[in-house]
Structure formats: C-alpha cells, structure tokens
Image (spheres, helix red, strand yellow):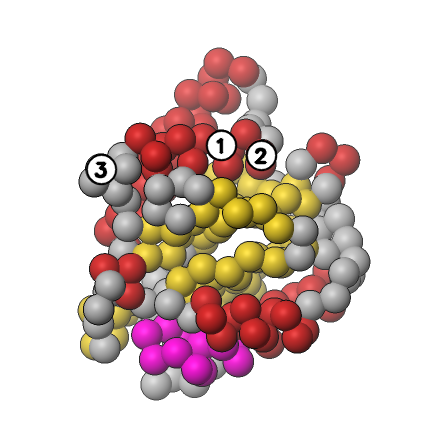
Amino acid sequence: MSIFEYNGSALVAMVGKNCFAIASDRRLGVNLQTVATDFQRIFKIHEKLYIGLSGLATDAQTMYQRLVFRHKLYQLREERDMKPQTFASLVSALLYEKRFGPYFCQPVIAGLGDDDIPFICTMDCLGAKELAKDFVVSGTASESLYGACESMYKPNMEPEELFETISQALLSSVDRDCLSGWGGHVLLVTPTEVQERTLKARMD
C-alpha cells in the first residue's frame, strides 16, 4: 500500500459562476482501521483562499503550519492577502524544496482572485501544478471522483446548484472507496460570504 493511501482521503474543488466549492471526506484511518470520523482536511488561508491536503495526515498538518507561517510573513511585508495564483506558486516551491524527502501530500488549492474570478489547482507531492477551469480532485477516491465530476459538472453554476453537485459527486465517490468516507465537509465561497456545511453519509 502506498504511503499516500495510509490514512485515506477524498478531496474535490469545483468552480461555479463567481464562486467555488471545496469538499473533503471526514475519515482518518490507519490502513483499513478507522481512527477518527471528524478529521479536517480543508484549511483556511484567508477569507477567499482555502487549501485541502490529501495524503499522509501528519505531513498535511505540518505543511499547513508552514504555509500559515509563510502567508503571515507575506502579509506583514506586503500588507495585503496573497492571490490564489501566488499562493499556488508558494506551495509548489515549498514542495519542490523538499523533493528528496517529500511531504507525502497532494494539495488542492481553491480561491477567488481579481474580479472574483475563481481559481483552482492541484499538484503532486513534488509541486508539479495542474490547473483546471472546471474541477480538480485528489486523494484515494480520486478515480471515482473524476467519473462523478465529469458526469455531473456543468459550467457557470449558481452557488446552491454548485453545492448540490459537489456534494453528490463526493458522496457517490466515497461509497466506491473503502479508505475514505464517513460524511463530508463542504465549503462554498462567494464574493460576499463563506458557507460551511457538513454532510451525513454511510457510517461504515
């Protein structure tokens, strides 16, 4: 079993009309044994920028702390929040810096940039970016997430429809992966508000 599958995870970010949603499952396991059912994989960088970290849970938490530190330094120096594109480059550089002993996590970055245009991207553990205009996925359930998102996604969705779509895609995907699941956690970000919702799913 790959080290990326040790704790199990499912992450997806999706773009709507001047908004985006990012969702994850809530299971933390050790191989097939479930350890926690309320694990947080999506972290806030600032009001309009979030990062989800799939892969090894310990590395994800370490990496989040380092990213918060870097972002605070940027805020002190620049007196403004970081743009999503800049933050993606920061994450990529941070991962590549550790390429000979990498952080075993695959980030999903989602944010609202200039003129509230949504930006999403994912990368591998060495920081190779993959940009998308519709959705990005990561984690042990990524294969089934690709299938569900491909069939459900449509461009320019309003916030409520986007929430419904990403939730259904996540729930149907984690049912097909035994290493992720146990409910879901969805963040819906628009230019004016952030909605945080918890999904109930099969508890097995």
Measure how far apart labels 2 and 3 are at the Cα level: 25 Å
Q: Quadrant of residue 63?
A: top left
Q: Secondary structure at mark 1?
A: helix
Which quadrant holds the C terminus?
bottom left
Q: Secondary structure at mark 2?
A: helix
Give the percent coordinates (x, y) of residue 35. Answer: 23, 70
Measure how far apart labels 1 and 3 are at the Cα level: 19 Å
Which quadrant holds the N terminus?
bottom left
Q: In the image, what residue type sits under mark 3?
A: Phe
Q: Which residue is mark 1?
A: 89
Instruction: Say the numbered circle drawn on residue 100.
Output: 3
Give the percent coordinates (x, y) of residue 171. Answer: 52, 77
Q: Main secondary structure of the magenta part?
A: loop
Q: Is residue 113 above or below residue 19?
A: above
Please give the range of residues in magenta: 171-181
Q: Residue at x 72, y 56 (%)?
A: 16
Residue 95 colored in magenta in the image: no
Residue 180 colored in magenta in the image: yes
Give the percent coordinates (x, y) of residue 197. Answer: 56, 65
Badge 1: few (under 14), some or many (20 or more) residues near its Cα, within 10 Å? some
Q: Which residue is mark 2?
A: 85
Q: In the image, what residue type sits under mark 1?
A: Ser
Q: In the image, what residue type sits under mark 2?
A: Gln
